[in-house]
Image (tube, rainbow, N blue to C red):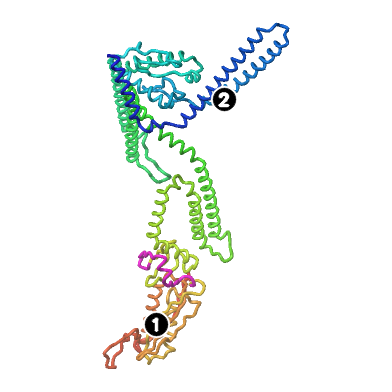
């Protein structure tokens, strides 16, 4: 029965050897070559040792045959001493070389059940060391499955010049002189040691598949699961107790978060955040305990031990890769920090210079104070852009195709979606250096008249006389014309003008006098500058007179115009002069006039003319 099993075992071994994976057939040819070269060196060393031993034996034999006073004996003794010394030096050098070769050639491990039993260092016939190790592992795995296995069936049997380790009629391994040379032992000693290791490994492997072994492992599994349940239960109890204590003593521990006078988080929001943090911490802690326990559970049984190793490897490999990536990235990170710090120092210098120029402490010929901050903004933008360009190659993954593709895609999106914004930014810079207006000026943009309340690189905001806030894009301002009522009002004075039409029957000198007095009587009109009148047209039925008066209150234009029109009406009515502007049509028979009766000749007495002087011109 055993011989039949041995034959079947041999057939299965040959079949598996033919059907093995191609990657195992060509396993690490470099290692095989190193092992073969080391074996060749061991053979040469052994041959030299044997030749030297034969030479020394021959010399010693000749010395014994000669008399004590023979000159030939002395010569042979000197020759023997030289041979012994040369042999010693040769052995030392050869030994050092062999140790170096062995350090580089670790051999092919034989590990049929996971742990390495021994190593194969040299070839046997056409079989390379890797082939021999794979065949031995397969044979031991099949022997372990033999239901009639007996440890005594593994024996050491001499075979011509070699020694075999056999199981019944199956040769497990052949120990050659080369194998003995590798281990500096006798062939029989090596074979005996290997046989003992094989018996021990098969005994342990069979014990791991016994019913008693499985029951013990199941007991350990149950104990681990019970402990795991208690730990999870304790974690849940702990977090429930923390939550209850937090609710009970929330006024003591939770008082909200304030930044200066701003309440960043009130008590309720802070409490909600703490509850969420506790929930996340509980889940993370439970998952961590489960992950630590799973390798223990899978490591209980040998056939699931590989799963435990994979779980540990899946965890440690990413952590190891992350740590290696962090350490290898540290020089680039330090470079980025240096570039950022230098840029920040330059930006602080730009801000300092801008504030000094804006305050008037630093004066540059031809450079206006209101250019300071816009110029500083442009310089800071260029500095940040330059910093990004310099830092970009040091960013992690910047050389990858995906990173570059995403960068190009975002650049295209930015270019397509920000064309109008960029045009407004450019227009904002141009307007800044053109200085058509500043904050607080009364201006007119197209049909919009108002005070400038804000201007930036994108838009300009106006507040009209009706308290309407209007936002105008800078590109529209640059493409149109701008009227500034305030820029010259302080020095030259803003000229307010309005036109009235008077009939030809009224002397123009009287009209000039009435318009001038009406302007001087208007609040907001400068009294130290004489108003002047222009006759702008000679119409069919009337003459057009334009009164021009100076004011420095450009922000009160509407009110001053209203007061000026009132004064013109009063003065002309008091003088009995009929205003015919802009067009006045009436069916009249010539017996009546539109002048009020109180102003008719004979009833009208001109009042004394008094000029009001504004205390705050």
**Highlighted range, magenta:** 464-488
Q: Quadrant of the N terminus?
A: top left
Residue 320 position (above or below residue 594)? above
Q: Is residue 50 left or right of residue 463?
A: right
Q: Going 53% across and 62% down the picture, which residue do you hit?
A: 369
**Disc 2 marks which residue?**
97
Q: Nearer the viewer, residue 341 or 35?
A: 35
Frontmost of labels 2 and 1 is 2
Q: Quadrant of residue 141?
A: top left
Q: Nearer the viewer, residue 357 or 214?
A: 214
Give the SS element for disc 1: strand
Residue 503 position (above or below residue 173)? below
Does the stretch in magenta take in 475? Answer: yes
Q: Going 48% across and 48% down the picture, which residue do you hit?
A: 393
Give the SS element for disc 2: helix
Q: Going 38% across and 29% down the picture, which residue do you hit?
A: 312
Give the image location of residue 521, x and y in percent.
Answer: 43, 78
Give the image location of residue 549, x and y in percent.
Answer: 45, 78
**Disc 1 marks which residue?**
499
Q: CA distance from mark 2 to mark 1?
A: 118 Å
Residue 554 position (above or below residue 86)? below
């Amino acid at each position: 029965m055993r011989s039949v099993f041995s034959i079947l075992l041999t057939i299965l071994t040959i079949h598996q050897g033919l059907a093995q994976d191609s990657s195992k057939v060509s396993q690490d040819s470099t290692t095989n070559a190193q092992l073969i070269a080391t074996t060749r060196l061991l053979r040469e060393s052994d041959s030299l040792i044997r030749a030297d031993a034969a030479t020394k034996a021959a010399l010693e034999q000749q010395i014994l045959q000669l008399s004590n006073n023979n000159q030939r004996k002395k010569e042979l003794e000197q020759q023997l001493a030289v041979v012994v010394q040369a042999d010693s030096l040769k052995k030392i050098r050869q030994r050092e070389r062999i140790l170096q070769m062995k350090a580089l050639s670790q051999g092919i491990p034989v590990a049929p059940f996971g742990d390495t039993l021994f190593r194969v260092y040299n070839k046997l016939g056409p079989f390379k060391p890797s082939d021999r190790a794979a065949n031995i592992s397969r044979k031991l795995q099949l022997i372990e499955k033999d239901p009639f296995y007996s440890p005594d069936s593994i024996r050491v049997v001499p075979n011509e010049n070699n020694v075999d380790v056999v199981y019944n009629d199956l040769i497990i391994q052949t120990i050659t002189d080369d194998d003995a040379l590798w281990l500096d032992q006798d062939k029989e000693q090596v074979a005996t040691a290997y046989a003992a290791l094989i018996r021990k490994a098969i005994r342990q492997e069979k014990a791991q598949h016994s019913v008693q072994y499985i029951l013990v492992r199941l007991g350990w599994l149950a104990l681990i699961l019970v402990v795991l349940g208690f730990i999870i239960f304790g974690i849940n109890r702990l977090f429930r107790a923390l939550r209850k204590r937090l609710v009970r003593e929330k006024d003591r521990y939770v008082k909200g978060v304030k930044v200066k006078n701003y309440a960043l988080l009130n008590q309720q929001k802070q409490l909600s955040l703490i509850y969420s943090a506790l929930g996340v911490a509980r889940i993370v802690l439970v998952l961590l305990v489960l992950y630590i326990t799973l390798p223990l559970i899978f490591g209980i049984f040998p056939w699931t031990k590989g799963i435990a190793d994979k779980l540990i490897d899946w965890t440690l490999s990413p952590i190891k890769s992350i740590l290696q990536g962090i350490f290898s990235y540290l020089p680039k990170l330090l470079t980025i920090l240096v570039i950022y710090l230098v840029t920040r120092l330059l930006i602080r210098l730009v801000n300092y210079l801008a504030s000094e120029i804006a305050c008037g402490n630093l004066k540059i010929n031809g450079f206006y104070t209101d250019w300071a901050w816009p110029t500083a903004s442009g310089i800071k933008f260029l500095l940040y852009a330059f910093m990004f360009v310099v830092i970009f190659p040091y960013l992690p993954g910047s050389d990858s195709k995906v990173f570059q593709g995403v960068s190009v895609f975002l650049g295209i999106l930015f270019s397509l979606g920000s064309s109008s914004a960029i045009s407004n930014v450019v227009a904002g810079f141009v307007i800044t250096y053109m200085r058509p207006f500043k904050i607080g000026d009364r201006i007119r943009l197209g049909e919009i008249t108002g005070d400038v309340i804000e201007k930036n690189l994108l838009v300009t905001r106006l507040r009209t006389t009706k308290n309407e806030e209007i936002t105008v894009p800078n590109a529209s301002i640059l493409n149109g014309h701008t009227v500034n009522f305030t820029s010259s009002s302080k020095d030259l004075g803003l000229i307010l003008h309005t036109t009235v039409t008077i009939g030809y029957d009224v002397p123009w000198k009287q009209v000039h006098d009435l318009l001038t007095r009406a302007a001087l009587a208007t609040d907001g009109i400068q009294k130290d500058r004489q108003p002047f009148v222009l006759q702008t047209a000679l119409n069919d039925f009337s003459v057009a007179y334009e009164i021009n008066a100076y004011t420095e209150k450009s922000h009160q234009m509407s009110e001053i115009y209203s007061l000026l029109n009132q004064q013109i009406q009063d003065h002309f009515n008091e003088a009995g002069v009929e205003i015919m502007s802009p067009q006045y049509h009436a069916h009249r028979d010539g017996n009546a006039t539109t002048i009020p009766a109180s102003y008719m000749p004979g009833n009208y007495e001109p009042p004394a003319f008094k000029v009001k002087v504004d205390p705050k011109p």
